Amino acid sequence: MKTMFTKEEMQLLKAKSPDAYIDKSLKSDISPGRKAFVTKFWLQKTGYSAGDLAYSRNRHPYWKAKKMEGTPERNAIRSSMHNYGDGNNIEWTENLISRFIDRNKKGKNGKYIHKDWELARDFRCTIAAIQHMRRKANMADKIFAGEGKKTTEKRLLNLLKMGEGTLRTMVRSMKR
């Protein structure tokens, strides 16, 4: 059975790359259901995967802007929902930093085991305070990797006592 395509669908099928396909798809006036059918046909014809299309879609300016809509509002709601601090800045003592190091682990998939808000709740602080410590921990890891040293709790503890600006300067100096 031969499949019939409209003129607009044929234009979509002529896309040479996933980037071109996403561009043409956005400009076309094809219904979502039909577009899904054409996309499946295009993927078979070209040998690209759905992952290739997803990658192009996520990089496209239109979809980037769509994903970012409402971000400030969502972040404000999230911050107010998970503000466990008492209004005072948290003082990161050696004991607290050590506890943070123990809880700030990543799983095999590279994502943190504990979410920002979970740590904020446990440490009775804000999400921003946890993100600040995670940035410092990530910079410390870069410093250790640049020096060819293994990350140990003692070394990490010493670097996490430093300010974020100091760590950032250390990371930049390594790149030179």
Image (cartoon, rainbow, N blue to C red):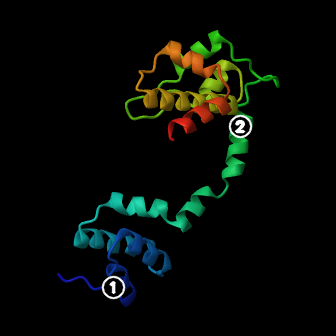
Q: Nearer the viewer, residue 127 or 152?
A: 152
SS category of the residue bearing label 1? helix
Q: Which residue is mark 2?
A: 79
Image coordinates for residue 5, horizontal then vertical, percent: 31, 85
The number of callouts visible is 2
Q: Residues within 10 Å of mark 1 (few under 14, many from 20)?
A: few
Residue 150 shows up from this direction: yes
Res. 67 image quadrant: bottom right
Q: Is residue 10 above or below residue 145?
A: below
Q: Residue at x 50, y 40 (%)?
A: 175
Where's the N terminus, which quadrant? Answer: bottom left
Residue extending farthest to the top is 95
Q: Residues within 10 Å of mark 2 (few under 14, many from 20)?
A: some
Q: Nearer the viewer, residue 1 or 111?
A: 111
The amino acid marked with disc number 1 is Met
Image coordinates for residue 13, horizontal then vertical, percent: 32, 79
> Which label number is shown at residue 10?
1
Image coordinates for residue 95, horizontal then vertical, percent: 63, 9
The amino acid marked with disc number 2 is Ser
From the viewer's perspective, is 114 left or right of 36? Answer: right
Residue extending farthest to the left is 1
Res. 109 image quadrant: top left
From the viewer's perspective, is 32 left or right of 49? Answer: right
From the viewer's perspective, is 104 left or right of 117? Answer: left
From the viewer's perspective, is 59 left or right of 11? Answer: right
Q: Is residue 175 above or below residue 23?
A: above
Res. 66 image quadrant: bottom right
